[in-house]
Image (cartoon, rainbow, N blue to C red):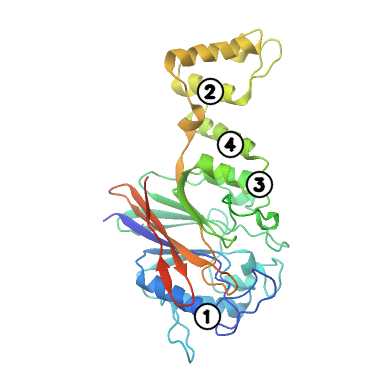
Amino acid sequence: MRKVKIAHISDLHLSNEVFGDGGVAIKGTAGHSIDKLVSLTKALKEIEWDLLLITGDISKNGSSSSFSIAKTWLDSYLVDGKHSKIGLELDGSDKNYLIVPGNHDYYNGTFIQENNDNYLDFFEYVGVNTSVEKEINSVKVKVHLYDSTKKKRMAKGELREKHKTERITNDDDLDIAMLHHHILMPPNISLTRVLELENVRSDTKYLLSCGFNSILFGHTHRYFQDYISDRIVIKNFPVKRGKKRLWRDLLKLKIVEKSNSVSYERKKSQNGQYPDFNSFMEYLYIKKIVGDTIKGPNDFCSIKGFYDELKLYKEKNGNILLDKSFERNLHISMAESACQKDENSCSFNTMEYDFINRKLKYSRIAINEEGYVKGKESVADF
């Protein structure tokens, strides 16, 4: 069959008391809605999926009791007078789930990220080079897990340098990265600096350079899902400044990927003028990747001679369109809160990779107090 169906949920914010009111202190810090949790459970039991990926904030405040509730909901079920058997009952089933922690999972009963001691009593540690490999319907699925929490901060995150290890990806496999904090913010959503990754430019550059098929995250309680180029990811980068620099850094990495002998330090003309970045990248591409002979900036008295050389080459051979030649499409899934009490819109995302027809199908499943609603399915070639 060679099809893999993924369900992506995030930011459940399960409270200390599963059947309590969830409590509202500050907007965005409420616990779950019991009715939404029932609807979420029903949806995940009725919709087909092979692997459930949870991108953090499964707890409201990182308390031991909230993690106990989360673990019971995933593996078994919860019961009260009004609702019976609220749970996915995954323990002993042929379905699997993976989870990374979010900032709320580090709170330990406070509103500052302290430690993950309570979390580790119930869920696996996410450390350096944590990847889980599974065979699903004859497809090798590799899920790369990242802990993006940052201690002593309320909501900010980071990818620690020691965690940004090389990840081996393969076109015949399904490689998925999951973290809590976002690397993209759609243009219709206002930016909130306090929620961002601390080193978001370098972290995004790293994630985009790994060759993942999908990158999954939550944290914002906002929805976005699409199959887009890495250029579009950068266009919707959550920090206004640094977009061009991020794209340039990524181009450098991609040229080095194709030629181990490349040095991208810009050369200057004989009178000391440096070429603009894109022109020099085109020169490197022609010389090192295409393998054609072309003169560099240092071969000319002024930089104008180098630009004329480049223009002449493109007139003879066609425009290189360097940026386009290095663009790579990938699937981005940013999940809303799945069942938080004070959110007007709750949902989770689904995606299906068909490796026979090389098709990706993805959709949003809306969650409310009355039930769930399947959204329109989108299809892309991958």
Q: Are marks 2 and 4 in contact (CB under 8 Å)?
A: no
Crowd class of label 1 (few under 14; some 14 to 19; many from 20; radius 10 Å): many
Q: Are marks 4 and 1 in contact (CB under 8 Å)?
A: no
Spatial CA span between label 2 and label 1: 57 Å
Res 239 label: 3
Q: Secondary structure at mark 2?
A: helix
Look at the picture and state if 243 lies above or below 260. below
Spatial CA span between label 2 and label 4: 14 Å
Kind of residue at disc 3 = Val
Q: Earlier in the sequence, mark 2 or mark 1?
A: 1
Q: In screen coordinates, is 90 left or right of 298? A: left
Task: Quickly name the residue at label 2.
Answer: 282
Q: Earlier in the sequence, mark 2 or mark 3?
A: 3
Task: Quickly name the residue at label 4.
Answer: 247
> Which one is nearer the viewer's eye here, 270 or 358?
358
Kind of residue at disc 1 = Ile
Kind of residue at disc 2 = Glu
Q: Mark 2 or 1, which is nearer the eye?
A: 1
Quadrant occupied by the C terminus: top left
Res 34 label: 1
Spatial CA span between label 4 and label 1: 44 Å
Res 89 label: none
